[in-house]
Amino acid sequence: MTIRDVARELKLDWHTVKALDKEYMQKQLQQNPVAAPGVIGIDEISLRKGHTYRIVISDLERRRPIWYGGVDRSEESLDMFYEWLGVKKIKKIRLAVMDMWKAFQNSTRKNAPQAAILFDKFHVMRHLGESLDKVRKMECARLAGKDRSYIKGQKYTLLSNKENLTLDGRKALKKLLKANKRLHTAYLLKESFGQLWSYQTEGWARRFFDNWKDSLKWQRLESYEKFAEMIERHWDGVAAYTRPENKVSLGFVEGLNNKIRVIQRRAYGLRDEDYLRLKILTCMLKEI
């Protein structure tokens, strides 16, 4: 329920309900102090449409966000987290899971040099989804008439997990892929790439990636070729998942990131950033 819903139900002022909610969340945090994390997840969120960012850090073993802050997504902003955490707790970090953002890598290598860096599937597949959407846009611009009508306005259908689509959505996807060979190829390449995280050794993962990259030849998928080059540059951080000591629940990481984004979308328009901070930091804590 929203603050407005609760206020209407209890016949209370909106500001009173919000103040009580903040007080409750602060109490939750007091009763759940942050322990030294062994595996951290580093993510950024956009406060508004534009380039206003904040960083969210999660303890992936205890399954909870532990820090919200910074002024942007720069190296200096992530340094603020490590300064807040303290030298003693930093030494316990053995793995940092993040996007392929240079500033996050630099700050982590500087402040927690003992930690391995892992680029998680959620962020990597998001980059590949963007590459697929570029193919869709190019095909939409290239075609006209009926062929174009199959593609226009189908971004959600194309980029969503097939399991999440409605029956109508699946029918639209089938029609779209049947109508456009290049999009069909791009879609199949995207779906197959997720297999990379199923390999238990780096050698087999590398063989899969090399074969996937070779399959791009003659396909004229420029955005996919750029994606492959990006993976090549960041291979160590992608392949880190094959090592037994670096196994984290990718499903939990994706679920947590999605949950934070739902909170973020609901908070659009709210000017009280501290309220958003509390909502994110308590979203995985037990009720009191």
Image (spheres, rainbow, N blue to C red):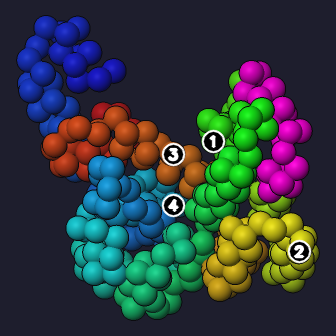
Report if the CB atoms under discs 4 and 3 are less than 8 Å apart.
no
Q: Which residue is mark 3?
A: 258
Q: Is residue 136 left or right of residue 274?
A: right
- Location of the N terminus by quadrant is top left
Q: Residue at x 73, y 41 (%)?
A: 144
- The CA span between labels 2 and 3 is 34 Å
Q: Residue at x 74, y 21 (%)?
A: 168
**Residue 278: image x %, image y %?**
25, 46
Please determine whether, in this image, residue 28 is positioned above or below residue 232: above
Q: Which residues are magenta?
A: 167-187
Depth order, front residue of 255/122: 122
Residue type of the residue flagged with mark 3: Asn
Residue 266 painted magenta? no
**Residue 213: image x %, image y %?**
84, 75
In this view, the mark in front (4 or 2): 2
Q: Which mark is residue 116?
A: none
Q: Which residue is mark 1?
A: 155
Report if the CB atoms under discs 4 and 2 are less than 8 Å apart.
no
In this view, the mark in front (2 or 3): 2
Q: Is residue 69 visible?
A: yes
Q: Residues within 10 Å of mark 1 (few under 14, many from 20)?
A: some
Q: Which mark is residue 217?
A: 2
Whichever of labels 4 and 3 marks the residue nearer the N terminus, that label is 4
Q: Which residue is mark 4?
A: 60
**Residue 104: image x %, image y %?**
43, 78
